[in-house]
Image (cartoon, rainbow, N blue to C red):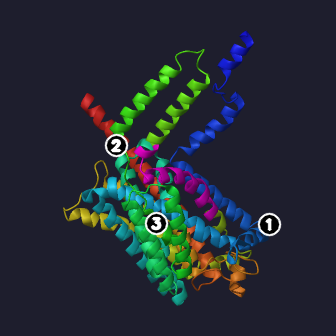
Amino acid sequence: MENQSEVRIAFGAPKPLSPFIHRLLSPAQQFQKTEFAGGAVLLIATIFALVWSNSPWKSAYFQLWQSPLSLQLATFQLSKPLLLWVNDALMAVFFFVIGLEIKREILAGELANPRNAFLPLIAAFGGMIIPSAVYAATVQLMDGGQDALRGWGIPAATDIAFSLGALSLLGARVPASAKVFLTTFAIADDIGATLIIALFYTGAVKVGALLWAALALCIMFVGNRLGIRATTYYAILACGVWFAFLKSGVHPTIAGFLAAFAIPSFRRIEPMKFLDDARNVLDEFEKSIISREDRYQERSSQAQQSHFASVERSARIVQTPLQRLEAALHPWVAFVVLPVFALANAGVTFPATLDSILALMSHPVTLGVLAGLVIGKPLGIYGATVLAAKTGWFQLPRQLDRTHLLGLSFLGGIGFTMSIFIASVGFGSGHGGGQGAGHFEAATFGRGQEYSHHAGSPVESSAAKLGILFGSIIVGGIGVGVLSRNSHRTARRDAQRATKSSD
């Protein structure tokens, strides 16, 4: 009897992880919670793509992303190379999460207050116009031709994950307002980059398909107004919007961005009501477990299950569907979607000869992207912000001086994810026949097959990726250096003031 009692008491008790498993998983769990984690995983995927595409197994890398993947239902079949499933489907999820973040910021974040939002919006506007102009001027000066000019939108984008990851390296050495400014600016920049893709990097548009997309979006918004909160309802319709955009000629990732704004942002119960209900349920739950002897009786177990279900339901309806989806999808985007995108698109096979290396480095697109990111982006962000502040209508956030702004302007030039995406849309993926994706020498002697909505050539795609990689590294290093040096200068000045005041 004593043994049976012990077994009954042990039933359902939490089973802790073994010390070895806990030690193994704890660093990964802590790392995932840091702001730097997403950018670090993205960087690892990029390095892996570059190493793989320049290794003896590079043909396997190119063949992998050209492998066809098909979905078939009865007579319907959708077949694409794996690369396009990544760029058109997985990246639609990325744009969907970006749309959710922007909607949240507009409703209750930094973009909800026009006074707080205007200066980052002006910075984003300058950070798109000036680098695009610098790119176009550089390409024209280098006599790059009309095809090269298609890449004017590449240096206009900012990568949120990498820029915030670089800023997080400085920790508390930069004021909190710096992170707020950079985040708000990057979100506004994403809006601009999405508009650039939709308006300027779209092929021949099929109006009929767009009408079907508009109908599906309308049904989503109607469901929102009617109070429908079921995720399945919006997921099915969002897939329909995506497919309609795919057939329309407009890049299908725009569907993810638009669908995000149809996701409900209302609660079923207010937080105080949830708090009261949860307290009542927990009180009842406490009563059900006071007696150790009755703890696992059938009736008590059923009551506890009812309590669990009640708390879960209340917790679900006190959150908005927008909050739940953003929280659920953000880790998948940060640690799966973006790394896979980088792995698929960052592979550039460097030329084997010195002459070819010099030709690639001096290509008009490479120099245009480098100039746009390293010169145009910081100049546009810093110049537009300072000019706006000088009018007296706007002012820099508290604790943020012009040196902070200069460092943040360089970090805003990190354009990895969105820049590579615009390059793949504008120039083609660069994945072709022969030696395949991003191979400069193969592209020089033969175009190969291209999987893109737009004309382009692998040589331009390779040159753009090279410019993005080097440009992002340069501006990231300069930005971190400027902010770090400014923090040391500020610390020394504060220490000197403290010493003088004590004397």
Which residue is depicted at the point 63% across and 84% down?
A: 457
* Residue 329: in magenta span: yes
Q: Which mark is residue 259?
A: 3
Which residue is depicted at the point 62% across and 36% down?
A: 26
Of labels 3 and 1, earlier in sequence is 1
Which residue is depicted at the point 62% across and 22% down?
A: 296
Which residue is labeled 1 in the image? 57
Q: Which mark is residue 220?
A: none
Residue furthest to the left in view is 392
**Rendered-image quadrant of the N terminus:** top right
Would you say 259 lies left or right of 126 here? right
Number of marks in the rendered image: 3
Name the foreground residue: 124 vs 87. 87
Q: How far is the residue under mark 3 from the one under mark 1?
A: 40 Å
Would you say 85 lies left or right of 58 here? left
Say what amino acid the circle numbered 1 marks. Answer: Trp
Task: Tell me which segment is drawn in magenta.
Answer: 316-341
* Nearer to us: label 3 or label 1: 3
Which residue is depicted at the point 38% across and 75% down?
A: 129
Q: Position of residue 198 (x, y in %)?
A: 46, 77
Residue 441 found in image quarter: bottom right
Name the foreground residue: 326 vs 195. 326
* Nearer to us: label 2 or label 1: 2
Which residue is labeled 2 in the image? 270
